[in-house]
């Protein structure tokens, strides 16, 4: 699954979603993680109420399952969730590498229900009719 991190320094989750200079994107599996891309944002990112600054970021993360942020505003969170991306707030700056390891460990074990749902993102619902047959009798 793809995971996005709001970051100023590309090392830690240390940025408010709307103010983040960078969004780092990784592919995460139970076996490991790999860096996919970092997208840099310019301009006046700290202008509150400027919803236009969110559109390019939403576009970058829309294929991700999870977004780690230091903070996110209400409208930003609503827009992220509308794209079926699960925002997770860290309470203090955390190393992206540490978060990746923690996430891999959770994936190896028994992920909580919200994460199982997130893992289904992007997988087309397919129906195997053989499984759906119900024996009457």
Image (tube, helix red, strand yellow):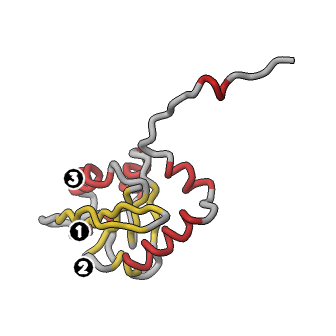
The residues bearing labels 3 and 1 have C-alpha atoms spaced at a distance of 11 Å
Image side of residue 104 versus residue 131, left or right = left
Q: Quadrant of the C terminus?
A: top right
- What residue is at 58 percent from the left and 54 percent from the top? 114
- Badge 2: how crowded within 10 Å, few (<14), some, or many (20+)? some
Q: Between residue 117 and residue 33, name the one nearer to us.
A: 33
Q: Are marks 3 and 1 in contact (CB under 8 Å)?
A: no
Q: Secondary structure at mark 3?
A: helix
**Earlier along the polypeptide chain: callout 3 or callout 1?**
1
Residue 113 in the image: x percent, y percent?
62, 54
Q: Which residue is mark 3?
A: 56
Q: Secondary structure at mark 1?
A: strand
- What residue is at 32 percent from the left and 68 percent from the top? 6
| Quadrant of res 123 | top left
Residue 8 in the image: x percent, y percent?
25, 76
**Earlier along the polypeptide chain: callout 3 or callout 2?**
2
Image side of residue 95 versus residue 135, left or right = left
- Badge 3: how crowded within 10 Å, few (<14), some, or many (20+)? few
Q: Are marks 3 and 2 in contact (CB under 8 Å)?
A: no
- What residue is at 29 percent from the left and 52 percent from the top? 58
């Amino acid at each position: 699954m793809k995971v996005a991190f709001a970051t100023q320094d590309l090392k830690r989750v240390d940025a408010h979603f709307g103010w983040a200079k960078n969004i780092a994107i990784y592919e995460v599996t139970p076996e490991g993680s790999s860096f996919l891309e970092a997208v840099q944002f310019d301009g006046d990112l700290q202008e509150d109420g400027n919803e236009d600054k969110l559109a390019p970021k939403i576009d970058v993360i829309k294929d991700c399952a999870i977004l780690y942020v230091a903070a996110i505003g209400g409208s930003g969170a609503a827009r992220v969730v509308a794209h079926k991306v699960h925002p997770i707030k860290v309470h203090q700056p955390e190393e992206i590498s540490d978060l990746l390891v923690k996430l891999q460990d959770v994936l190896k074990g028994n992920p909580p229900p919200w994460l199982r749902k997130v893992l289904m993102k992007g997988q087309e619902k397919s129906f195997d009719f053989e499984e759906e047959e119900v024996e009457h009798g």
